């Protein structure tokens, strides 16, 4: 898949043109740098819930997730108890998977206790130096040595439900890498 031009005449990465939600996500968020422990925890939490599901499913449920998880403020989520787990299991509009809910709460506790912060840890795996911009989606990797190292580090620290593929998706969504295709209006270097 390569570039698609939508009905608005704007050239975009072909994967994003399926729905208006995807177009908005692509145009306004994907690949833009995200900093701060709370915003990065929100991305990590959504990647936790995405494991084994389509990103479209998570994207369409994102507002419900934000509401159910109190905006993904790590300190708040870290304080959740069994009552909150039960509440979340009964919350319409989110993925009601006990293991993923408990992993998100546990991951929040790890973020709160993390010396140096989540921002510094995750961004330490952002690649440095340039690379050729992909011309087709087939040139975009699912994982990289950096995402594999990030996932390994997170796992060693006790984080759950994040592997090399999820770590790379996290890197893409938070602007640690920029995989907009050549010709996409969001590709800063053309």
Image: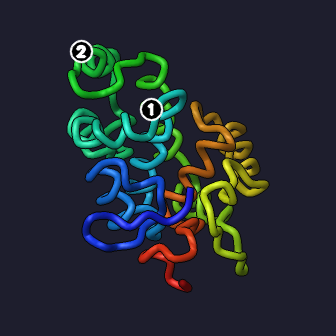
- The answer to whether one can see residue 35 in this image is no
The part of the image, by quadrant, that contains residue 156 is: top right
Whether residue 150 sits left or right of residue 19 in the image: it is right
**Where is residue 6 shown, x and y percent of the image?**
33, 64
Whether residue 13 sits left or right of residue 134 in the image: it is left
Whether residue 121 sits left or right of residue 108 in the image: it is right
Q: As rendered, which of 2 and 122 lies closer to the eye?
A: 2
Q: As rendered, which of 131 and 5 lies closer to the eye?
A: 5
Residue under numbered circle 2: 90
Q: Residue at x 35, y 24 (%)?
A: 95
Q: Is residue 174 above or below residue 133?
A: above
**Where is residue 66 shown, x and y percent of the image?**
26, 42
Q: Residue at x 43, y 62 (%)?
A: 30
**Where is residue 2 shown, x and y percent of the image?**
55, 62
**Where is residue 162 shown, x and y percent of the image?**
60, 37
The part of the image, by quadrant, that contains residue 136 is: bottom right
Secondary structure of the residue carrying numbered label 2 = loop
* Quadrant location of the C terminus in the rendered image: bottom right
In the orientation shown, which residue stands out farthest toward the bottom? 189
Which circle's residue, 2 or 1, is located before the other in the chain? 1
Which numbered dot is residue 183?
none
Secondary structure of the residue carrying numbered label 1 = helix
Q: Is residue 62 above or below residue 7?
A: above
Q: Residue at x 21, y 22 (%)?
A: 92
Q: Residues within 10 Å of mark 2 (few under 14, many from 20)?
A: few
Which numbered dot is residue 49?
1
Q: CA distance from mark 2 to mark 1?
A: 16 Å
Q: How many marks?
A: 2
């Amino acid at each position: 898949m390569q570039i698609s031009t939508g009905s608005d005449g704007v050239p975009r990465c072909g994967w994003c043109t399926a729905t208006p939600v995807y177009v908005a996500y692509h145009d306004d968020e994907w690949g833009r740098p995200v900093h701060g422990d709370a915003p990065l925890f929100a991305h990590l939490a959504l990647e936790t819930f995405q494991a084994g599901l389509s990103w479209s499913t998570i994207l369409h449920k994102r507002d419900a997730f934000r509401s159910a998880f109190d905006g993904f403020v790590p300190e708040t989520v870290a304080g959740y108890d069994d009552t909150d787990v039960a509440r979340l299991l009964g919350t319409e509009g989110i993925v009601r998977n006990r293991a993923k809910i408990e992993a998100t709460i546990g991951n929040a506790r790890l973020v709160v206790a993390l010396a140096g912060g989540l921002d510094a840890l995750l961004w330490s795996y952002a690649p440095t130096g340039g690379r050729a911009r992909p011309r087709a989606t087939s040139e975009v990797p699912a994982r990289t040595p950096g995402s594999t190292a990030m996932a390994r580090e997170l796992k060693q620290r006790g984080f759950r439900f994040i592997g090399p593929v999820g770590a790379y998706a996290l890197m893409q969504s938070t602007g640690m890498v920029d995989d907009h295709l050549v010709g996409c209006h969001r590709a800063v270097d053309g």
